[in-house]
Amino acid sequence: MKLVKQGYKLGRFASQRQGDRGFAMPLAIGFGLAILMITVAMLVRSHSDRATASLQQATGSSMNVTESGVTRLQSFLNNHRSMATYNLSDWLQAPTQMPNVNACSPTNTNQIASYSAAIRNWQNVDPADPSKGQYRLANYTYVPRNPSQPHQEPGTGILEVEGRLTNRSSISRLRVSIPVQPGDIIGVPIPGVWISQGGIGGNRIQGDVMTNDCSAALNSINTTGINPDTGDPYEAQYTNLQLPALPTQPNPPLNTLPGNINTNLVLPRPGDEAVSRQLNSGQMVQVFEYVVNNLQIAQSSSLTITPGQRITLYLNGNISRGGNIRHDCTTAPIGVRCTPTNFQVFGYGPVGSSICLNGNNYIDMFILAPNYAVGVAGGGGGQGGIRGSVWSREWSNGNSCGSNTSNTTVIQTATWEDMVGLMPQNLPPQVAPISAWQRQEVAP
């Protein structure tokens, strides 16, 4: 009976063991499948993370390339600031669409057009190592603040540049906004002579000469000396800048001058009135202003400007050769500041008017006379002329007034800072630093 019971217990235990095995098997398979699925998911995620990281790295690298392209195109704009107010479509047709870039040099406008066409294709960041990536100009658009003046500043230039890594599909695009402001005289040389047409004849100019006349032969303009501000030799050059506008004459005038001076006259005279004017430097100064029509100084007489005083002549006619005009800063008392622009002559006469000065002494002065021929009669043995600047329609070197010898008739000593509110016209705009940027992804 005990054996039967023991057998019964053993059989029941074996039966339970077999049932447990039947339940454990599916459970083990389930656990294994879950682990397998988790492993596969982790592998997939790891691969995805690597792909994402690789893509992010490629995108970041291509963005670095794009930023390099933006920097280079900004530099190009800074070197050709007149382009900043035109669209890319105008750059591509620079000789016809951008006449103000350099009217006297088709080569420059042709180079701009060629460069603009080339930069639209992929360019190596490092020409010696293409693996560092490539960039290209996608577009440039100028948006003026005043839509009725499409090429006038102020406004904003929208520059779009793309970059990529070599053999990579990722292309990054940057769209940056560049403020374009009106130009100023920073970096603009102040010429000793600036003429709208013609040449200088045989006279020598110790200073820069600027001309708006594309037909004038620059190699025929005799310049000499070194610019102390730059260390470069003075030179003749074409310019797209235009002569400054004449200031408005005082009305009514506080002071006048007689047309004929038959005795020695010193300015300012006792009782003459001065007005306050602001120099380009911001300094306020007192200026004695005189309105005069035709000025004729008797041969034995002179008009003397007191060194250290500021005198401006508003000339409505001509200055004829005769007696001397004297303004010599070398005789100024110690401690008295005297500059050539202390004595200014503004000519308002029509085309054909003239200012003819004697050549037997140097006059510290500045002349702005857009319609005039200005000259120094004779040479005074090389001892006469102008220390300062002469800006006029033409230089007079004919028989009526002028010396065609090689004496130095103008010595450049004027400065922009000492001008009273005078600025060249048609100044190239200022290209300011980037004010905003936006990153974009584009299809390869």
Image: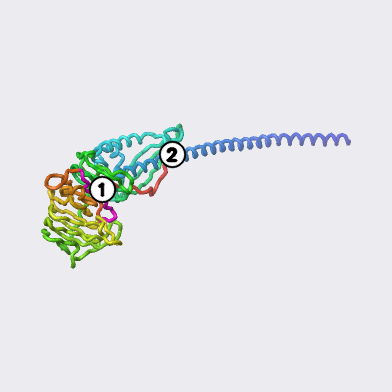
- Sequence order check, earlier mark of 2 and 1: 2
**Disc 2 target residue:** 65
- Magenta stretch contains residue 6: no
Quick one: 175 or 426, which is closer to the camera? Answer: 426
Picture coordinates of residue 174 (x, y %)?
Answer: 40, 42
Camera sees residue 188: yes
Asked if marks 2 and 1 touch (Cβ < 8 Å), the reply is: no
Q: Residue 357's x, y, as percent?
A: 16, 52
The numbered mark at residue 191 is: 1
Residue that appears at 26% across and 56% down? 330
Give yes or no for residue 414 being in the magenta stretch: yes
Residue type for callout 1: Pro
48 or 151: which is nearer to us? 151
Q: Residues within 10 Å of mark 1 (few under 14, many from 20)?
A: many
Residue count near mark 2 (Cα–Cα under 10 Å), binned few <14, some 14–19, many ≥20: many
Q: How is the image coloured?
A: rainbow
Q: Which residues are magenta?
A: 406-421
Secondary structure beneath dot 1 equals loop
Nearer the observer, 27 or 341: 341
